[in-house]
Every structure is written in C-alpha cells, then in structure tokens.
Image: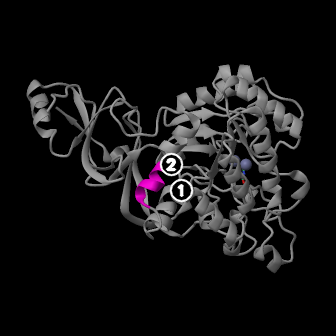
Amino acid sequence: MKNYSNVDVWIQNANVLNEDGQMQRSDILIQNGKVLAILASGSYKAADQRLIENGSGTMTVYDAQGKLVTPGLIDMHVHLREPGFEHKETIESGARSAAQGGFTTIACMPNTKPVTDNPDTVKLVLDKAKEANLVNVLPYAAITKNELGRELTDFEALKAAGAIGFTDDGVGVQNAQMMKDAMTKAAELGMPVIAHCEDDSLVKGLYVSEGNFAKKHGIKGIPNESEAIHVGRDVLLAEATGVHYHVCHVSTEQSIRLIRLAKSIGVKVTAEVCPHHLVLSDEDIPGMDSNWKMNPPLRTPRDVAACIEALEDGTIDIIVTDHAPHSEEEKAKGMQLAPFGIVGFETAFPLLYTEFVKTGRWNLDFLVRRMTQDPARVFGLASGKLEVGAAADLTVIDLELEKAVDPNEFASKGRNTPFTGRRLSGWPVVTFVAGRAVFGAEHAQHVNI
Ligand SMILES: NC(=O)N[C@@H](CC(=O)O)C(=O)O
Ligand SMILES: [Zn+2]
Ligand SMILES: [Zn+2]
C-alpha cells in the first residue's frame, strides 16, 4: 500500500463500474482536482491513520455508502440561453441545473441573442461559465451568421476563441452549397459540424409529428422525411468533404437507416438521441399541452423502437438532453404558438435508469457509457472516464432513491417538462467537478486531520 499524502478529498465506499462493467466497492482519493488513486474499500484506512499522525491539512471525506459513482455525465447538446434570453435560463442557472442532474461537462448551443457567431460572444459564454464556477461549459459556434443560412461565420476566429464545433441548432441549414462550404472549412480546421436536420419547406407551421395524435386531432403533422432529407444530403456531403459530421437529436427510423448506411461505408458520421425520443411517442401526448412540444417532435412508436435499437447497435453513439428551457408565459401560449423545447438535465439519468436499466433491457454500464466515455470519444474530450490522473469529475447516484418528478425542485429556471409526477429512481445526489462538490455539497463532510 502506497502512502498517499496530501489527499484533498476521500470518497469512501463508492460502487464503481470497472472496465468489464462489474461493480467494485472502492475508495477514491483526489488531489489537486485529479484522481490520485482508486483503491479497494477499506484499504486506505491505515494510510489515513498515518496522515492523522502526521497532522496534515484538511480533507473532505464523503461516505458514498455503496452508492454508484460514475465519471461525471457529459451532455453535448444543451441550451443555456445567455446572452439574450436570461428570463429562460442563465449560464449560472443552467450550469446549476446540469450539476443537479449529475452532469459535469455540457456543450451549449449558439442560438442565443446575439447568436454565438462571433468570437466576443464565445468569450462571453466562457467568461460567464468561469464566473459561475460550476460545471465545464464548452461553447459551440454558429455555422452561419445569425443562423440565417446566408453567410458563413469566421470558423478560424471562432475556433481560436474556444468554440468546439459548428452548428446552427434550432434551424437546419437549408442550402446544400452552404453546408458543403461549412464542412469543407471545418474539415480543414479539424472541427466537427453538428447538424439540426430539418427541411423548412416540409414543416411550415406544423408542431406535432405525422402520427396518431395528429390524426386524432385532425391536424397536419410534421413528416419524418423533413429530418431524414437533411441527414441523407449531409452524409453525402460529409463523404465528399471528409468532415466529422454529427447529427443532432435523431428521431426517425428513416434518418437511422441513412446513418447506418453511411457508417457502414466509412463516412465519419456520429449521432445523438434524447431521452424523450427513447421514452415517449406521439401517442403519449395527453392533449394540447405545450410541455409535450419539442423539436424534433415526439414521433410514432415505430420510430421510438428504431431509436432504441440504433442506440443499442451503435448507429447512434450518445445520449444528450437538448435541455431547452422556456418561461412559463411562453409555454402558456398553447400547443400551436408556444416555442419548441423541454428541459432535460434533471430528469435524464433517472428517466433512462428507470425505463431501461431497472426493467432489465440495458446494463447499467451501457447507460453510463453512452453518457460519459462515448460523448468524450465522439468529441475528443479528455474527460468521461474514472481513472488515475483524470480530472476528478464524478457523479454520485442513488439508485435506490425513488421519487416523483417535481419541477419545483429543478435548479433550472425552466419548468417545461412532460415528466411531471413520473416516479423515477436513480437520482444523482452529489456532483464533483475537479474534486469540488458543485451539487450536494452538504453531503460531503469536512473533517480536519
Ligand atoms: N429542441 C427544441 O425543441 N428547441 C431548441 C432548439 C433545437 O434544439 O432545435 C430550443 O432552442 O429551444
Ligand atoms: Zn435542434
Ligand atoms: Zn437543441
């Protein structure tokens, strides 16, 4: 046993998933924000005793009491709304909400006001995130100025300012030449293009998908092709340009078919799916309630099944929330007029744990990987794994804790969720970023040794 000295944080009795997906009762030692050691529980006591005898500094001790400790969750698609829409969310409130949901790294979309289409706004986002001092915030920058699809932004300058990829999320890039130019430029810079896939001409004024809900209410629905047409166009352009092309919030069987084909011939394409598109279909929508309105819309049960299978077979790589807060006034405008979007940080893990792991469909390890090391792999991040030397970004999850979703408990300013009242288990209880508890700190006890 090595004599570990100057330990800042000692997490005792953590259940950690090892490389083979097996649970191991472990103690985690943290020093200077990094994982110093992962030891079999019980084995650190003696060393601690020596520390006590030496009488060195202050250590934070947290007894996980057998709770699951995972690498901090990563969410590569979120809306923080600042600058410009601070009444919906701020970087501070969004980061707090992320931490409460167990996320330690989040990548925020540029559909702010001003749009994050210039280096100053990228810097502002990074500065505000630093000020909030909660979770790691990675900004995306827009593909086109003001996300209007007319003129490319300055990719070099945006990359230099700290943007991690380019996307016009919120709208699709309608012009194929524009998308091809963007991909060519991004490929030169070694940056990914992240696409919200939606053909405007097929969705004008529509707000639910073409399915039984639309039929029942006698309204015209959004067809699946509106998404898949862009996916098909873009995988061809990705093949031609060699760019890393990432598909946002995949929701249809047709898109999945195209992504599967593109992957099979070696196109550099990756894809994400949101918890709501794995758990809900249009047939679950209870009525004209805007908390069930999001883009892409909830699709048919057949699409939901296709999304689940695609995640399982690797066609879809990662899970993201697309956390999209809106104010109560905005959402009160009714199904037709309210903005698209639902919040996602604080229900994502418990929802998927309850629906897929507790039911026996997925191993716990599968779910955790899709929310940690897979997003890190897809976007080339250093985080996502619990290992010695890595940043101590960790999430403590109480798999036994069961409670109903109560939006009043959200740290987000947004309350717009279709999951109110749903009983879920597997709630994050403490979130550490670089060894500091940014959520649930009250459970991490300080002792002087
Ligand atoms: N997903 C949504 O329904 N809304 C997002 C935009 C988007 O992700 O396309 C938003 O910004 O509100
Ligand atoms: Zn989108
Ligand atoms: Zn989005």
Q: Is residue 153 left or right of residue 400?
A: right
Query: Do tag 1 and tag 2 residues touch (Cβ < 8 Å)?
Result: yes
Disc 2 crowd, CA 10 A, few/some/many (<14, 14-19, 20+):
many
Is ligand 3 less than 8 Å from the beta carbon at label 1?
no
- Which amino acid lies under the numbered mark 2 shown in the image of this protein? Met
Give the distance between the C-alpha atoms of the residues marked 1 and 2, in whole angstroms. Answer: 10 Å
Q: Is residue 329 above or below residue 264?
A: below
Q: Tag 1's secondary structure?
A: helix
Q: Which residue is mark 1?
A: 348
Q: Which residue is mark 2?
A: 371
Task: Give the residues in magenta.
Answer: 363-369
Camera sees residue 12: no
Residue drawn at (82%, 59%) of the image? 225
Determine which quarter of the picture holds residue 385: top left
In this rendered view, identify the residue nearer to me: 367 or 98: 367
Camera sees residue 438: yes
- Which amino acid lies under the numbered mark 1 shown in the image of this protein? Ala
Is ligand 3 less than 8 Å from the beta carbon at label 2?
no
- Give percent across and percent down for residue 363: 42, 60
Q: Is residue 48 left or right of residue 200?
A: left
- Give percent across and percent down for residue 232: 79, 50
